[in-house]
Amino acid sequence: MSTQLAPEVQTSAVPVKINTVGIETLFNRAKEIYESIARRAYELFNIRGRQDGFDLEDWLNAERELLRPVSLDLTESDNRLTVRAEVPGFSEKELKVNLEPRRLVITGKIEESSEEKTGETFTTSRRSNEIFHTLDLPVQVDPTKASAILKNGTLELRMPKSAKPETARVDVKVG
């Protein structure tokens, strides 16, 4: 009897590319997600009969529908930070890891579509599984020496700490 694994189950570690992108790119992505959530929250407001007083509830429901939560575990040693993120169902091609000296951003998107035939008509539905998680790091890391591995739905990032910045004394002169 042979056992076949689901396509999203990985049995070996796969390296994930770490990008360094500008703040403008991240800002634009966050803005797109914000606008998607706002549109869905407005749809929920309309579905509920445009009744006031449930803004936060509509927003949180829209966010829950559009974004998948990411569970993170951060550990620190003398020379590095390690982050483990639970991202089941995502492949290394669907994940984007952006690392700055003090910030980590993990994004990913899986679009699923299905067709259903009812009589002579086809209905196509699309569903998006998306993650967008930002983590401010407690210490400065070196993004050029970081590595990321995806195995069995867990993304592990190893980020070496940056050398401590040198301090310099500056004399103030009266002018």
Image: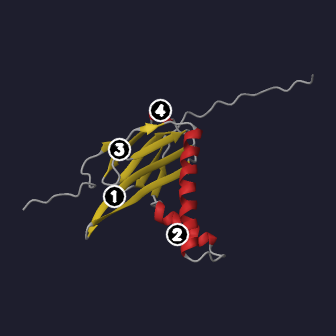
Choose the circle earlier in sequence order: 1 or 2.
Answer: 2
Asked if the residue at tag 3 contacts the one at tag 1, i.e. Cβ–Cβ closer than 8 Å, the answer is no
Q: Please count the marks in the image.
A: 4
Residue matched to label 1: 113
Residue that protrudes farthest toward the left in the picture: 1
Q: Residue at x 23, y 58 (%)?
A: 6
Q: Residue at x 39, y 42 (%)?
A: 148
Q: Secondary structure at mark 4?
A: helix
Q: Which residue is mark 2?
A: 61
The crowding category of the residue bearing disc 2, from other C-alpha atoms within 10 Å (few below 14, some 14 to 19, many at least 20), is some
State the CA–CA distance, disc 1 to disc 4.
Answer: 37 Å
Q: Tell me which label, 4 or 3, sits earlier in the chain.
A: 3
Other-residue count near label 1 (Cα within 10 Å), few / some / many at <14 / 14–19 / ≥20: few
In whole angstroms, how far apart are the C-alphas of marks 1 and 2?
A: 22 Å
Q: Mark 2 falls on what kind of element?
A: helix
Q: CA distance from mark 1 to mark 3?
A: 18 Å
Q: Amino acid at mark 3?
A: Lys
Q: Earlier in the sequence, mark 3 or mark 2?
A: 2
Q: Which residue is mark 3?
A: 93
The Cα–Cα distance between marks 4 and 3, rounded to whole angstroms, is 20 Å
Mark 1 in CB contact with mark 4 (< 8 angstroms): no
Query: Tag 4 or tag 2, which sits nearer the N-term?
Result: 2
For the point 26% across and 67% down, the residue is 120
Q: Is residue 91 left or right of residue 142?
A: left
Q: Left of 156 or right of it: where is 175?
A: right
Label 2 and label 4: CA atoms lie apart by 38 Å
Name the residue carrying label 4: 144
| Label 4 crowd bin: few (<14), some (14–19), many (20+), radius 10 Å | some
- The quarter holding residue 124 reads bottom left
Query: Where does the image place residue 80, in percent across and percent down from the top left?
Result: 48, 42
- For image coordinates 50% across by 43% down, the residue present is 78
The single residue placed furthest to the right in the displayed view is 175
